[in-house]
Amino acid sequence: MHIDVPDWAARHHFWNHRNPKSGDRAKDFFEKAHVRPLLEQAYTTIREGSPDEVAAAEATIVRLQRSWSAPMYAGKATQLATDLHLVQDSKGNTLELDAAIDSAVDYFRQYKPYIHDVDADSAKKDKYLEELPLVIKHAVLGLQEAMARDNRIIGEVEFCELLPGLAVPHKTLPDYGRRGDLKTKWSKKTNTKKGWSDNGIPKHLSGMFDIKNVYQVAGWWAMNGHQPPFLVYANHTDYQVFTPDNAPELRDDFLADVVEDIKLYHKTTENLLRAASSKEELFTFVSPDWRALHWDEPHAYLDEARKIWGVQ
């Protein structure tokens, strides 16, 4: 569903809201108002420009294109396998689990570490190649449990709709059944003799990192008719399914409060977009939290952001 946004949002290339817990407002503005337009222009130039213009465009892409990381790519590989095994194709077929795992392993082997700490990311890739088959098996068990009553398992869908009182749509993509998501956990590299420690599955959803996922759930819960949501966590040792039955954070009353908080956050964002007549003015309304994990980006990307805010 396409929704036209007001001129005051379009002038900042702000086409939709996202989960407010996924990063600070400054990062969202930087991505949408500055980075994405530059990248879109660079890709257009590569198709249509002169050799010198293409070289400059390629340099822009290298400087600003955000890279994957081993945990992100391993999570994507896991969902590839669970999709192949659980979600029917156009002919109604699915892959056997072993074949789905083989496809995911082959896919993950293609990953090339690009982030600023290449050595550490390469070590994670090797470790996660070992863990990937077990993570997939646990993810499948968790998803089958979460959707045991579903007649047919539906894969990822997109919701992009207006929440009441807002002028710009909220966008979110539940992984399964229009109401649930899969979260993977991967071992952490440590300075201990063993070198790695398990990244355990949460016992509840009230923690700082897991409440972010609850806010993600609340977005699609508000747009799918309040279907009972679920979150499945999987690592190489176990899995956990959270539903309204065992997680108060996934119950209607809690999610309704979260939706109101999301709307308040988005309303503030819209007020700033409306007030700023230019990209430069927009950035003066927000201040990045450089120490936050969501600003852990390649040096060139960070250098671009620091120039925007006059930080050397």
Image: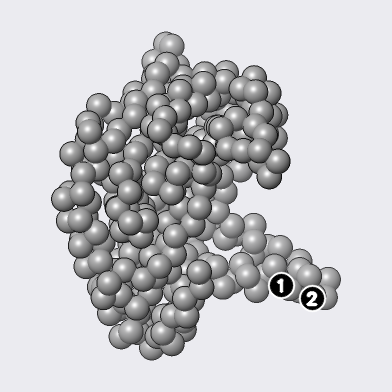
Q: Is residue 110 visible from the viewing direction of this image?
A: yes
Q: Which residue is drawn at 30% across and 85% down?
A: 275
- Tell me where residue 99 sits by quadrant: top right
Crowd tier of the residue under label 1, counting other residues whose Cα lies within 10 Å: few below 14, some 14–19, many 20 or above: few
**Image x and y of residue 173, in percent:** 46, 53
Q: Which residue is drawn at 22% across and 33% down?
A: 245
**Image x and y of residue 274, in percent:** 33, 84
Q: What residue type is labelled 2?
A: Gly
Q: Could you tell me if the residues under marks 2 and 1 are in contact, i.e. CB atoms within 8 Å?
A: yes
- In this rendering, the answer to whether 41 lies above or below 299 is below
Q: Which one is in front in this view, the residue at disc 2 or the one at disc 1?
A: 1
Q: In which quarter of the image is the C terminus?
A: bottom left
Instruction: Name the N-terminal-most of marks 2 and 1.
Output: 1
> Disc 1 designates what residue?
44
Q: Which residue is drawn at 44% across and 80% down?
A: 5
> Disc 2 designates what residue?
49
6 relative position to 45: left or right: left
Q: Is residue 186 visible from the viewing direction of this image?
A: no
**Image x and y of residue 193, in percent:** 42, 11
Q: Residue 263 carries which label?
A: none
- Tell me where residue 207 sits by quadrant: top left
- In this rendering, the answer to whether 43 lies above or below 274 is above
Task: Name the one closer to the observer, 228 or 3.
Answer: 228
- In this rendering, the answer to whether 222 lies above or below 129 is below
Q: What residue type is labelled 1?
A: Thr
